[in-house]
Image (tube, helix red, strand yellow):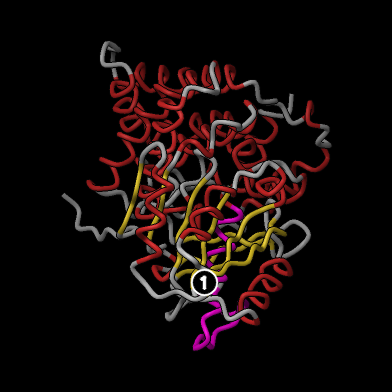
Amino acid sequence: MNPFQFQTVPNIISGLGSIQELKNVLSQQNYQKALIVTDAGMIQHQLHQPILEILTQIGLEYLIYSDIQADPPEHIVLEAVDFATQEQIDVIIGFGGGSSMDVAKIIALLAHPKQQQKLSEIYGVNQAKAPRLPLILIPTTAGTGSEVTPISIVTTGATTKMGVVAPILYADVAILDATFTKGLPPHITAATGIDAMVHAIEAYTSNVKKNFYADMLAKNALKLLNHNLAKVLKNGADLEARQNMLVGSMLAGQAFANAPVAAVHALAYPLGGHFHLSHGHTNALVLVEVLKFNAPKAKQYYAELMQLLDPRSTGCTDGLCDLFIDHMQNHLEQSGLTLKLKDLDIPEAKLPQLAKDAMLQTRLLQNNPREMTEQDALQIYQAIYE
């Protein structure tokens, strides 16, 4: 067994109605003012009301920062940090999808009164240092796993993103309550569900830090997601299946936080940066072609995952690997997502630029089981064009 280190959020609370545990979490400390970090959609649909009721019940003063947008740009992050600093916030509650939780992490770090670092200084791996404010994360989608990762992704230019990756970004508490996800439309449910499956698959095949503990989490995540995604797409009100999706997403998040993701994400990022597609959708677009590309080096792992998902599947390693790729293709076809770049009005002339930008994702590409060149990336984009 390879040596490994494993880190995660110290307190995970899961279950339908588990948001009520927020009372106990907050009452254990003498907080003065909380900041809820979320987006306008959460406010519009009043999804944050249970949180406000709890804060009112315990007499904790609060403010709401709801200007978070998908793929949050630096200026939004900096405005949020300034707001929290000026208001002397002493506990951060991130509520929403991955973008809201990612920004909440950075606010908790940079709005601490004794924090000396600037946003520009913490990009990369292990650059962000303590102290930070107490941080509670509550996901409203089953996909990013951001509630249990030490990663925050920021849009740094017109088409570029950078990551802040450091253990100090692990939240103090993550609360998984599927009552917040029951109103998700099918396309978001599908995209985020595929995203979580990608996290599990890439963690299981991670080149640098693959380990026994992350493997265990990735396999259990994939089983839950595989079994429940079709259920929630068929019946969005199936709260048991939605809770299972949330737990699966969380397990996948724990897995890839310790055995990082790779080429699927590296090729997905430029698509999101240039064309403002959701992260889950861009992962779905490139997934199968990356699996095919990786198969010569990762077929044993893909075969193992196929037997995990369907113990009745038999055959040689190559055959099981092909079955696994077909199985994921079927998930994509059932998702209802548009799966060809041409159908998304992406110009074919842009493909070389996408391939060039993908090569900049060295933090991710080093984890891929097979080395990928710019020409390889271009061929994958060409394969999904039409």
Residue shown at 37% from the left, 31% from the top: 222
Residue shown at 50% from the left, 29% from the top: 292
- The quarter of the displayed image where residue 314 is located: top left
Magenta-drawn segment: 99-122
Q: Which residue is mark 1?
A: 108
Q: Position of residue 354 (x, y in %)?
A: 71, 47
Q: Position of residue 263 (x, y in %)?
A: 52, 45
- Could you tell me the amino acid type at mark 1? Ala
Residue 113 magenta-highlighted:
yes
Residue 223 drawn above or below residue 203: above
Judged by its main secondary structure, the magenta piece is: helix
Residue 305 magenta-highlighted:
no
Quadrant containing the C terminus is: top right
**Residue nearer the viewer, 270 or 40:** 40
Residue shown at 25% from the left, 40% from the top: 216
Residue 85 drawn above or below residue 51: below
